Amino acid sequence: GENVEQHPSTLSVQEGDSAVIKCTYSDSASNYFPWYKQELGKGPQLIIDIRSNVGEKKDQRIAVTLNKTAKHFSLHITETQPEDSAVYFCAAHYGQNFVFGPGTRLSVLP
Amino acid sequence: ETGVTQTPRHLVMGMTNKKSLKCEQHLGHNAMYWYKQSAKKPLELMFVYNFKEQTENNSVPSRFSPECPNSSHLFLHLHTLQPEDSALYLCASSQQRGGEQFFGPGTRLTVL
């Protein structure tokens, strides 16, 4: 089955700096990779996604890159702001389900 | 705010209690899911319903019993739980099975 690893588990950055979170997956059949942001007391919310026929996707300050050969994908957040502080989850679509990474707690320090 | 609501938001129960979690989606979706979220662990898929029919049970103990009376409502009935069942229980829905998922805020369950 699919296995998704995510690093780092915690990340602290200064406001205005960039943050990068990396995920790897094991099954080359996975073809859709969403990223979720979970704020305290809330459920995960989709922030960006990428399909396997695309190498990069950008939406304002966030971007996702995918390397199919190496089976890894990354979330990039530029010009971080305090409201970016949350737990971020990557996921890989496998079969009809999603397999999630364990999450990265991002803290943006003012 | 998503179109998926969950009640209660917090629940404390003893090991011999019976309680139910409720999820309602206002998005017109056809698939609904229950996930368990424990600290520092990936989300664990528990159950999947598609058009009110259960399509997946991920080896969940029988002390968890799901019910889906219609495409908009999903319940998780709890009975004789263990302290290790304490977690955040998330409900999600998607337009079709395997599609983009929208999550509710979760129920924080504590089993004493």
Image: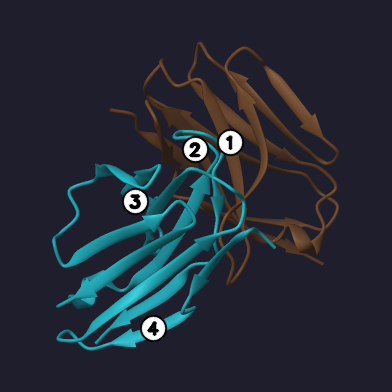
Q: Amino acid at mark 1?
A: Pro
Disc 3: which residue: B44
Going 64% across and 60% down the picture, which residue do you hit? Answer: A86
**Near-viewer residue (B42 or A98):** A98
Q: Amino acid at mark 2?
A: Ala
User: Which chain is disc 3 placed on?
Assistant: B
Going 24% across and 87% down the picture, which residue do you hit? Answer: B112
Whole-number angstrom distance, CA of label 3 to CA of label 1: 16 Å
Chain B color in figure: cyan
Mark closest to the chain's N terminus, 3 or 4: 4
Q: How is the image coloured?
A: by chain
The answer to whether the residue labelled 2 contacts the one labelled 1, judged by CB atoms less than 8 Å apart, is yes
Whole-number angstrom distance, CA of label 3 to CA of label 4: 20 Å
User: Which chain is disc 4 placed on?
Assistant: B
3 and 4 marks on the same chain: yes
Q: Amino acid at mark 3?
A: Glu
Disc 1: which residue: A34
Whole-number angstrom distance, CA of label 4 to CA of label 2: 28 Å
4 and 2 marks on the same chain: no
Indicate the position of residue B74 as horizontal and vertical percent values: 40, 60
Give the brown chain's letter.
A
Indicate the position of residue A3 as horizontal and vertical percent values: 35, 33
* Label 2 residue SS: strand
Indicate the position of residue B7 as horizontal and vertical percent values: 48, 75
Quarter of the image with the N terminus of chain A in it: top left
User: Which chain is disc 2 placed on?
Assistant: A
Disc 2: which residue: A91
Visible residue check, residue A8: no
Q: Is residue A20 left or right of residue B95?
A: right
Going 45% across and 51% down the picture, which residue do you hit? Answer: B71
2 and 1 marks on the same chain: yes
Mark 2 crowdedness (10 Å alpha carbons): few <14, some 14-19, many ≥20: many
